[in-house]
Image (cartoon, grey):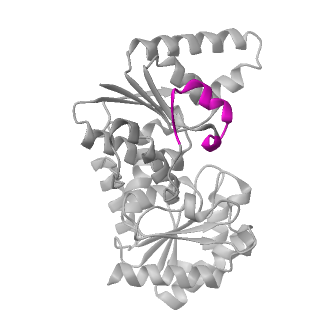
Amino acid sequence: MKVAIIKLSALGDVIHALPVACALRRGRPDAEITWIVEAREYALLRDHPDLDRVIPVNTRLWRRLIWRPSGAREVWGKVGRLRTRVRGARFDVALDLQGLFKSGVLTAYTGAGLRIGFSASHCRERLNALFTNRHVTPPPQAVHVVEQYLSLLEPLGLGAVTPEFRLPVRPAAERAMDDFLAEHGLKPRDRLVALNPGAGRSEKRWPVAHFRELAERLGAEAGARVLLLWGPDEVHMARQIATGLGSRAVLAPPTDLDELTALLRRCSVMVAGDTGPLHLAAAVGTPCLGLFGPTRAERNGPYGPRSRGLQSPDGTMAGLAPSTALAAAQGLLDQARS
């Protein structure tokens, strides 16, 4: 059986979908499993033990090209080549976990006889349901998106699956992050708290001043060292938080996805908004504190028994008080030590 998983982006969403691949591999060990994903998220899935092949696409590039002179022709050529490649794989089953129009088109391109997706009422774009021929409505108890994704496996006879995240260990990245910690006098999982102030959308960002207060109090009241993570165009926020904290706060180095994964494995606790690095930390087993404003913690929070999400009382990130986050982070630190 040849199976295509269509989950294009973003990083956190792809991480939440990983248990689908794990469950397929365990439940159908002879299946040939392919994942179709955006090029930006490809690094997460390459050489994944539960996948036979990963097909990267770049719809972000297509959207930029289409407005250029002759861009539409170039994009159409790229789409045609992708369609030929996907159709040539002769998939038996396609699983559309994205629920968007564009993922529906890719699902149709597979030519699979069984195309499984969410019912229209559960699709992010209702037109997606036109491209699938087996529609699943997640059961009421499937509150978290991880559980909702897994419900799509029920037509294949794979129900009651225990979610499992498996990410490859990259030895070179592991060594590099061990060297970085040693250079700064840090010990893996020794009350080391990672703070990630950035987020892809501004409304998901906790105020820098709140992070600054949390970092200061974690050092003064919890005896923790703080590791400040940052991504593209975010280093200024990390530096604002670190200013004046001395050796209690360390700025993380520039990292690729492999190095970030290795670094998160070495942290005692991770604190962040609803971002990819938060969900990556949860996937490698690091206790996580997710800070949620406009998105729902019960549906999108860090998944696993060692993590928790804090929901803002007023739906804004600023509405979450640093004292509330401090108490929750201290609780996770104490649990990690026990």
Q: Position of residue 59 (x, y in %)?
A: 61, 27
Quadrant housing the N terminus:
top left
Residue nearer the viewer, 271 or 12: 12
Give the vertical position of 248 relative to 299 (above or below): below
The answer to whether residue 232 is visible is: yes
Q: Is residue 149 magenta?
A: no
Give the vertical position of 308 relative to 25 (above or below): below
Q: Which residues are drawn in magenta? A: 121-136
What residue is rendered at 35% in x and 73% in y? 189
For residue 176, which quarter of the picture? bottom left
The answer to whether residue 255 is visible is: no
Q: Position of residue 272 (x, y in %)?
A: 57, 65
Residue nearer the viewer, 312 or 163: 163
Q: Exactly how many numbered labels are in the figure?
A: 0
Residue furthest to the bottom in view is 221
What residue is rendered at 46% in x and 61% in y? 303
Residue furthest to the left in view is 30
Quadrant housing the C terminus:
bottom left
Q: In the rendered view, does 94 fall on the left or right side of 33?
A: right
What residue is rendered at 40% in x and 60% in y? 263
What residue is rendered at 44% in x and 54% in y? 260
Residue nearer the viewer, 22 or 334: 22
Q: Position of residue 67 (x, y in %)?
A: 77, 20
Q: Position of residue 145 (x, y in %)?
A: 52, 52
Q: In the rendered view, does 32 fall on the left or right side of 277?
A: left
